[in-house]
Image: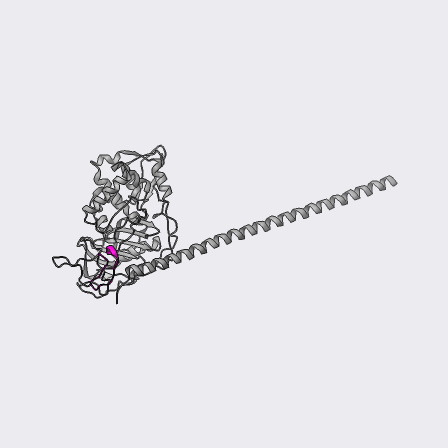
Amino acid sequence: MGAQFDNDELRQRRRTERNKKMKSEKRRQVFFRRILKAGFVLMTVLVLSAVGREVVIRYIAQEQETARKAGQEALTGGAGAGGESVEAADGSGAAGGNGENGTGGSQDGGSEGADADSSTAADDGTGAGGDAGTVDGDENGTGADGKSGSAGGEGDEAGDGSGDSADGSKKIPGWNAHYQKTGSTKKLKDQITSGHAVFIDMDTGEVLAQKGAGKRIVPASMTKVLTVLVAVEQLESLEQLDDKFKITAEITDYCYLNGCSVAGFAINEKVTVRDMLYGTILPSGADAALGLAEYIAGSHEAFVDLMNKKLEELGLSETAHFTNCVGIYNEDHYCTVLDMAYIMQTALQNETVREVLSARIYTTSKTKQHPDGLEISNWFVRRIEDKDTGGAVSAAKTGYVEQSGNCAVSYGVDKNGRKALCVTTNAPGTWKCIYDHVYLYKKFSKR
């Protein structure tokens, strides 16, 4: 009986010890779970804090850059008494990233705003004598009244009669001879968010509306309109469109190092000239543009020489000069919105180039690297086609670098069959750029 009692007591003691161990293990597990939970919460807080800090820093930097650009515009394009002021962008909906299109580039996440058609362009009431109060600076930087202006036509259009040509016609600094400013030309201000703009009746050459049209701009990837025009004009026959070119590592490295948007061709991929033409325009592919340059001229540098010769042929060499076929920023890579409009007008006269600029979607040829080809698209044409423009916009090329903001050149026909060209730069977002074009096409379709 005593032995039985001892065994019961031993079992009870073991049971008690086992329960203690289990409770201790449970406490340990609860403790570790709490530590893990606390660590997770702390990590989440740190990550969110870092992200929030980065967002705030980017926002502040963006606002500072907007203010800096506005100040710079005020200094370089400021007006005399009663002159045109440059409207500063509010920075809302600014594009992120480097590219200029929806594929591999910046794509504004802002929602589509309401059509700005209810806003009307202010008529400044000036007659054929020119806009009142504009900067008097001439191309050499000195105005008729002795005030200093910006060199190279950086100042606004002269309205005092200075710069008249021998035949008595008005010669406005920074304006090419292809388009005419009239007494009914609207001076745009805050009706659009873009910093520079021109809207042209393509049939008559009349400038219907403008905003700093004679000022030097950074064309960004709008450059590629001239790239494809020069490339096609250099072909001996259209049969060469099926010729193949091997994409090199140097081309892809150039794109990577300069943060360019690309069509997506791979190293050693053999692509056709036709594929490179569409790849240059629709996704704004630098790889395609560089491939065209090397195929046509043997080197990028030699091709750029051909581009500048074309600018001279078009009568634009006094106000336009390009240093690359891609649109990468360079101090010596510039033109005006008027120049870009005429480049676009000339390009549209070439049937092959017009087809490329008007394409919505294109699939490249099948290759070893891309057995199904690459599907590429012109996001500007696709996004504006369902907007109320009073007609149809059928061709366009976009652009974006930090110095240019979001920009685009487009061609459209209104409901009465009248053709128009529109060029804008320095919009603070991709959708804002689109809606500036929508506004201008819609407004002037009612004329």
Going 24% across and 43% down the picture, which residue do you hit?
307
Give percent across and percent down for residue 382: 31, 48
In magenta segment, residue 142: yes
Q: Which image quadrant: the N terminus?
A: top right
198 or 412: nearer the viewer: 198
Q: From which residue to which does the magenta span run?
A: 139-156
Q: Is residue 258 visible?
A: yes
Q: Quadrant of residue 249?
A: top left
Please tell me whether the stretch drawn in magenta is mainly helix, strand or loop: loop
Q: Nearer the viewer, residue 198 or 360?
A: 198
Residue 180 belongs to the span the image colors magenta: no
- Locate residue 436: give its quadrant: bottom left
Residue 235 locus on image (x, y percent): 22, 37
In this picture the colour scheme is one colour
Q: On screen, 118 above or below 297?
A: below
Question: Percent x, y for residue 96?
Answer: 39, 51
Figure quadrant of residue 135? bottom left
